[in-house]
Image (spheres, rainbow, N blue to C red):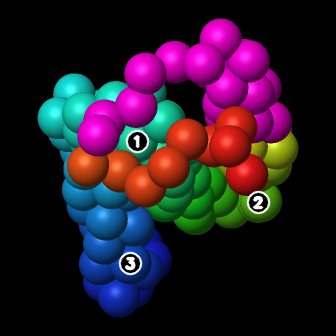
Amino acid sequence: MNEPSWIEWLIAALLLTGSLFALIGSIGLVKLPDFFMRLHGPTKATTLGVGSMVLGSMLYFSLQAGEPSLHELLITFFLFLTAPVSAQMLAKAAMHEKLRREPRTRGEPWEQ
């Protein structure tokens, strides 16, 4: 690779940041007490983490090939498009089924 070292540092920072967000989202999925709280781990932090890692991958392979790599851009687009929609569908289904919530959280979502 003949690119400047600052680009390598940027790629490394994107990959490390993305890995950290994915780890935090995964820990949240396991540790949070009820379904509605657990829903935030994969939909928020993990989506941001995977998006950051894919952005780092896009930058790396664009520099390797010498032309823009758009495959990763499409992956990021579909990830950011589908994650909120699937989270909304899961939350609506859980509200419809009246899943039990942790008593320490505020009110039931269907009582509003």
- Find disc 2 in the rendering and name its residue: 67
Q: Earlier in the sequence, mark 3 or mark 1?
A: 3
In the drawing, does residue 29 fall left or right of residue 112? left
**Amino acid at the residue labelled 1:** Met
Residue 1 or 35: which is nearer the viewer?
Answer: 35
Q: Is residue 91 visible?
A: yes
Magenta span includes 97: yes
Residue 108 or 46: which is nearer the viewer?
Answer: 108
Residue 2 versus residue 101 in the image, above or below: below
Secondary element under disc 2, as helix, strand or loop, is: loop
At which x and y percent is residue 20?
24, 56
Q: Residues within 10 Å of mark 3 (few under 14, many from 20)?
A: some
Q: Earlier in the sequence, mark 2 or mark 1?
A: 1
For the residues labelled 2 and 3, the Cα–Cα distance comes to 18 Å
Residue 25 versus residue 12 in the image, above or below: above
The stretch in magenta equals: 85-103
Tell me the tag on residue 10.
Answer: 3
Q: Quadrant of residue 23?
A: top left
For the residues labelled 2 and 1, the Cα–Cα distance comes to 42 Å
Task: Determine the residue positioned at 74% across, 18% down.
Answer: 96
**Amino acid at the residue labelled 2:** Glu
Task: Determine the residue positioned at 29% across, 40% down.
Answer: 103
Residue 12 or 28: which is nearer the viewer?
Answer: 28
